[in-house]
Image (cartoon, rainbow, N blue to C red):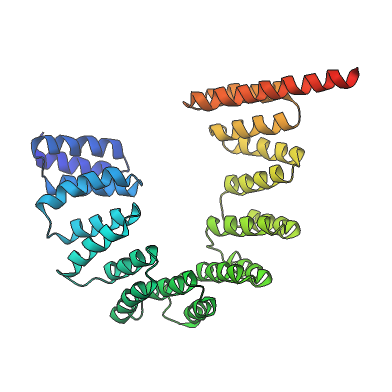
């Protein structure tokens, strides 16, 4: 196949989320033309999108050697270094980008990079520049609030969040803003205020599952068990997939050592998704806690058929056998 044909097939594979096939086509292109711009850019996109930033950086650095004035390459060099917690390098590439053209998000990312370095005055300087460039875009205001929060200026942060909620041009999901307010209230020690705002956040139809999990972790830390039970009811009535709802309830049941409740939840999860090996491992753990060691070992045997992680299977089996021996020994000692 010719380079153009390989690139067409790579793009088709990428669009169909067949990333392994796309990588194979692109690597073949690079064997024929090691500095091919399209191949390098798409490889960077695939690997950075999957969170493999070190691999993405390798391809991006190769592209940068030949296309160092290209804004897409410069942005990716900044973004990847920022994702790898290398803010100084990120700032360098973002500033190189700005020498070619102004960009709202590049300016904001410079602000965020300075924020990561705890250079809050410098961070605010760039965030303010971005806000002036696009005053109707809420992203800059959210970053400004975050910068205030990191400095312990909680009232200033909350003022910005509340202004966004009132602003008709706000383009940030309301549930997310209420979640941010809850987080700041928590940092202020205003537990009731945090609970109030979390409760508002979870009552939007499109609330992300991460909000429920953040609220759960907060309530667990504060030992608010009644509120957790109410949260689980709300979670069950949300549009979040049932499997994720049950996972959180199972975590809580295990935490409070209500293993009979946890066992019933595990049964439901196995019915919902019998191909998920974690459900078998969790069922094994719950059975172990209920002293049903033979049942626990059965679950491990089933898990073994669903996963390639042999070490995980081996360690789980070893743990259960050890627990069984310890339990049998204690029974015999009590009988004496």
244 over 103 or under it: above or below: above
159 over 147 or under it: above or below: below
- Which residue is at the front of the view, 173 or 55? 55
Residue 13 visible within the image = yes
Q: Which quarter of the figure has residue 283? A: top right
Q: Residue at x 30, y 67 (%)?
A: 110
Quadrant of the frame with the C terminus: top right
| Residue 82 x %, y % | 32, 57
| Residue 262 x %, y % | 71, 40
Q: Residue at x 20, y 59 (%)?
A: 74
Q: Residue at x 65, y 29 (%)?
A: 284
Quadrant of the frame with the N terminus: top left
Residue 15 visible within the image = no
Residue that protrudes farthest toward the right in the picture: 336
14 over 312 or under it: above or below: below
Relative horizontal placement of residue 29, taking residue 143 as reference (left or right): left
Q: Residue at x 9, y 51 (%)?
A: 66
Q: Which quarter of the figure has residue 315? A: top right
Relative horizontal placement of residue 261, taking residue 236 as reference (left or right): right
């Amino acid at each position: 196949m010719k380079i153009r044909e390989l690139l067409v097939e790579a793009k088709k594979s990428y669009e169909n989320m067949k990333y392994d096939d796309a990588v194979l086509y692109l690597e073949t292109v690079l064997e024929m033309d090691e500095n091919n711009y399209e191949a390098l850019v798409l490889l960077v996109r695939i690997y950075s999108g999957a969170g493999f930033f070190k691999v993405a950086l390798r391809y991006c650095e190769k592209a940068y050697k030949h296309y160092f004035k290209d804004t897409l390459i410069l942005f990716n060099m900044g973004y990847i270094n920022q994702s790898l917690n290398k803010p100084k390098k990120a700032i360098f590439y973002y500033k190189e980008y700005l020498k070619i053209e102004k960009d709202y998000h590049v300016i904001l990312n410079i602000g965020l990079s300075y924020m990561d370095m705890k250079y809050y005055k410098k961070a605010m300087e760039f965030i303010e520049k971005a806000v002036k460039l696009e005053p109707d875009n809420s992203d800059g205001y959210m970053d400004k609030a975050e910068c205030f929060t990191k400095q312990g200026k909680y009232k200033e942060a909350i003022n910005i969040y509340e202004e966004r909620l009132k602003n008709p041009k706000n383009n940030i999901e309301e549930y997310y803003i209420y979640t941010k307010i809850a987080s700041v209230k928590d940092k202020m020690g205003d537990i009731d205020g945090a609970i109030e705002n979390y409760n508002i956040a979870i009552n939007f139809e499109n609330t992300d599952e991460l909000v429920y999990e953040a609220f759960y972790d907060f309530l667990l830390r504060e030992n608010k068990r009644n509120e957790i039970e109410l949260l689980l009811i709300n979670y069950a009535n949300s549009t979040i997939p049932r499997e994720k709802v049950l996972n959180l309830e199972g975590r809580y049941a295990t935490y409070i050592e209500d293993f009979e409740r946890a066992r019933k939840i595990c049964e439901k999860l196995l019915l919902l998704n019998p191909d998920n090996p974690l459900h078998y491992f969790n069922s094994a753990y719950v059975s172990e806690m209920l002293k049903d060691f033979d049942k626990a070992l059965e679950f491990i045997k089933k898990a073994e058929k669903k996963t390639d992680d042999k070490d995980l299977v081996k360690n789980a089996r070893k743990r259960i056998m050890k627990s069984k021996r310890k339990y049998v020994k204690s029974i015999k000692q009590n009988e004496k």
